[in-house]
């Protein structure tokens, strides 16, 4: 590695990204410095502006530049349906893959007491107020099928039951194009238990 402390700082800065280790961070740094300094300046400017201007939606907690995100400010959506997801990227995935037209609530994580993540960190007080309003008829639990995601879904189901709101869980199972002998036993078990009329 070069003796440049600025280069070392740049490499260390790239290592904060998920999946980027020392070698990848070094390659990214050298690429920008050797081949595309203008792109590096655009990247730095875009990151700085995003960090300074993007916050959380006051209603659903997703990332946005405004007080309310584009979805929450759309009065044409179905207010009786509220889909709970772990991350803002889950909202994008559901919007692109489904015809769901209700609202969302983004937890920004999942319950994990060992990591110090409880109901307060997930904004569940705000969610409880939305459920108390009586507007939500169905709470769609779309947390990931991990242990923490399942615990979170169970907690949310109980929260909904206290308010008399129906809670549903997205189906988990065999992916389209998948073959049964390649599917792990947990996924196969979920798929078999969640079977429905054809």
Image (cartoon, grey):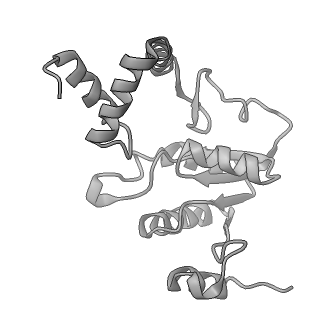
Quadrant that contains the C terminus: bottom right
Q: Position of residue 134 (x, y in %)?
A: 72, 50
Q: Nearer the viewer, residue 107 or 132?
A: 107
Q: Give above or below for 2 relative to 142.
A: above
**Left or right: 191 in relation to 22:** right
Q: Residue at x 50, y 16 (%)?
A: 39
Quadrant that contains the N terminus: top left
Total labels drawn: 0
Q: Nearer the viewer, residue 54 or 180?
A: 180
| Quarter of the image where one finds residue 175 | bottom right
Q: Nearer the viewer, residue 10 or 175?
A: 10
Q: Nearer the viewer, residue 133 or 85?
A: 85
Q: Residue at x 35, y 42 (%)?
A: 20
Q: Residue furthest front?
A: 34
Q: Give above or below for 12 relative to 152.
A: above
Q: Residue furthest left?
A: 3
Q: Position of residue 84 (x, y in %)?
A: 61, 53
Q: Give above or below for 60 relative to 98.
A: above
Q: Position of residue 186 (x, y in %)?
A: 51, 82
Instruction: Residue 134: tell me if it is visible.
Output: no
Q: Give above or below for 41 relative to 67.
A: above
Q: Residue at x 57, y 37 (%)?
A: 62
**Left or right: 96 in relation to 158:** right
Q: Position of residue 121 (x, y in %)?
A: 40, 45
Q: Residue at x 52, y 23 (%)?
A: 54
| Quarter of the image where one finds residue 160 | bottom right
Instruction: Residue 70: tell me if it is visible.
Output: yes
């Amino acid at each position: 590695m070069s003796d440049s402390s600025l280069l070392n700082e740049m490499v260390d800065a790239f290592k904060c990204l998920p999946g980027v280790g020392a070698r990848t961070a070094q390659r990214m740094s050298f690429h920008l410095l050797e081949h595309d300094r203008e792109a590096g300046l655009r990247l730095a400017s875009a990151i700085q502006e995003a960090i300074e201007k993007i916050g959380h939606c006051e209603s659903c907690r997703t990332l946005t530049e405004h007080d309310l995100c584009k979805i929450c400010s759309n009065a044409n959506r179905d207010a009786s349906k509220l889909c709970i997801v772990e991350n803002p990227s889950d909202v994008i995935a559901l919007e692109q893959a489904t015809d769901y037209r209700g609202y969302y609530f983004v937890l920004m994580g999942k319950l994990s007491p060992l990591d110090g993540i409880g109901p307060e960190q997930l904004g569940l007080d705000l969610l409880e107020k939305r459920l108390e309003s009586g507007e939500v008829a169905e709470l769609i639990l779309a947390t990931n099928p991990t242990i923490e995601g399942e615990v979170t879904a169970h907690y949310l189901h109980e929260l909904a039951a206290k308010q008399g709101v129906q809670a549903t869980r997205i189906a988990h199972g065999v992916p389209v194009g998948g073959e049964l002998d390649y599917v792990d036993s947990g996924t196969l078990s979920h798929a078999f238990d969640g079977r429905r009329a054809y």
